[in-house]
Image: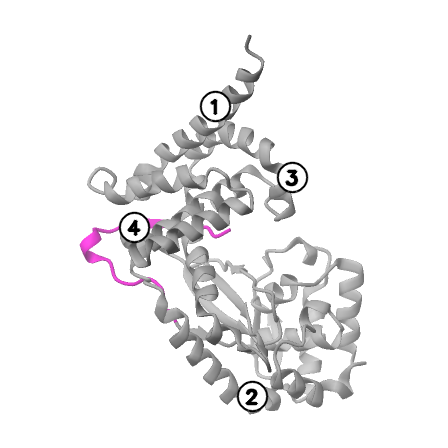
Amino acid sequence: MKKLLFIFIGLCSFVPVFALTANYDERVELLSVLCNLADYEEYNMGLAAQYDDAVALCFAPYRDHAAVDMFRRLHETDGIGYNAPIDYALNLKKEGDRFIVDNRNIGDDRWDNVDLDAVADTISMFYRDTNFPLFFKTQESFYIATCNAFTDKVLSLIDESWYPRFYGTEPSETFNVVIGFLTGGCNYGPTVERPGQPRRVYAILGYVEQPDAGVMFVENPEYYRNLLVHEFNHSFVNPMLTNATFYEAMSAPATKLFDTVSTIMNFQAYTTWDTVINESIVRAAVATYFLDNGTPDDARNSINEEMKVGFAWMPGLVGKMDYYRRHRDLYPTFADYYPRLIDFFATYTDSIDAQVDALFTP
């Protein structure tokens, strides 16, 4: 999912690469409110307790606003929903009391046939007509308290310095954790690429609070920790397949592998062999992370969970990642070791063929 360019720096000079603090974003909340008013199911989960009530109280009179009608039409005609509004929001720039599109590479093809500037103009009108800045200001103490609590309860559990130590490189992209207060049970991973600027990778994490269960990240911080440990690994794993040599060498075994698991992977929206390979290696990296930053049971549970969703090769792949972890004198960077992972997938797919062939051998 994530891509970046990276440079090699001596291991002893590494410093933490992620500023691990949670934040809130006015653009995300503005677009989320519009989707809420336009009756997008995924923005009306009712999982934000008092915040849901505050939104309803403040914005109910504006359900027929032109901007809300526009988002209803975008939903019906262009399929705008789920991550697409957030992707658009992060490519907006605020100028006074209006928003402009300052990057047209939205990153989601559902926006391809939409007049991006007209959308921004209509959103800006809603922003002014509803006095959205006042609402945002009145909620700011809630936003800040929530983000501080998330940083304390979840992000403090993550050893961000592990990543450059393990991969032997530092990323040139920035990683941003943002709470989406109306995105509910949905979490999104948009990226923003502007010319001449580092690629910005986001984890938009839905706020979930229920009267009988409390705030989810407080009650179950490990869930969010695991989610972010996974996402951070993408920033180091995905770039490997931007190397033409690695891509060509991986193509044959990975295509063969994908053909055997395409049904279950398609169901999870992993529709290409390169996505399945990146997901496989990232998931193996998560288990490896827990070998250094958890317990054997954490790593074992991680492996078992991945096997349940179709990654049957996970034990062997984690074994390969662990070998890399224990032999850094031979492999200073992950790129140095990546050919061994290509060999693993080739051997694995050949073994499947051999088992099937054996059934038909006299």
Chief SS of the magenta region? loop
Mark nearer the N terminus (1 vs 2): 2
Tell me the CA gap for discs 2 and 3. 44 Å
The circle on residue 263 is 3
Residue 76 or residue 300, whichever sits in front: 300
Q: Which residue corresponds to mark 4?
A: 166
Q: Amino acid at mark 2?
A: Gln
Image vertical order of residue 12 relative to residue 67, above or below: above
Q: Secondary structure at mark 4?
A: helix
Label 1 Cα crowd, 10 Å radius (few <14 / some 14-19 / many 20+): some
* Residue 61 in sight: yes
Which residue sits at x=33%, y=40%?
335
Q: Quadrant of the C terminus?
A: top right
Which residue sits at x=50%, y=64%?
203
Q: Are marks 1 and 3 in contact (CB under 8 Å)?
A: no
Q: In which quadrant of the rendered view does residue 176 lie?
A: bottom left
Residue 148 or residue 289, whichever sits in front: 289
Q: In which quadrant of the rendered view does residue 293 lie?
A: bottom left
Q: Which residue corresponds to mark 2?
A: 139
Tell me the CA gap for discs 4 and 2. 40 Å
Mark nearer the N terminus (4 vs 1): 4
**Residue 242 location, x and y as percent?**
45, 41
**Residue 338 location, x and y as percent?**
36, 37
Mark nearer the N terminus (2 vs 3): 2
Image vertical order of residue 290 relative to residue 101, above or below: above
Residue 295 or residue 196, whichever sits in front: 295
Which range of residues does the magenta coloring cover?
1-20
**Residue 94 location, x and y as percent?**
56, 77
Q: Amino acid at mark 3?
A: Thr
Mark nearer the N terminus (3 vs 4): 4
The circle on residue 350 is 1
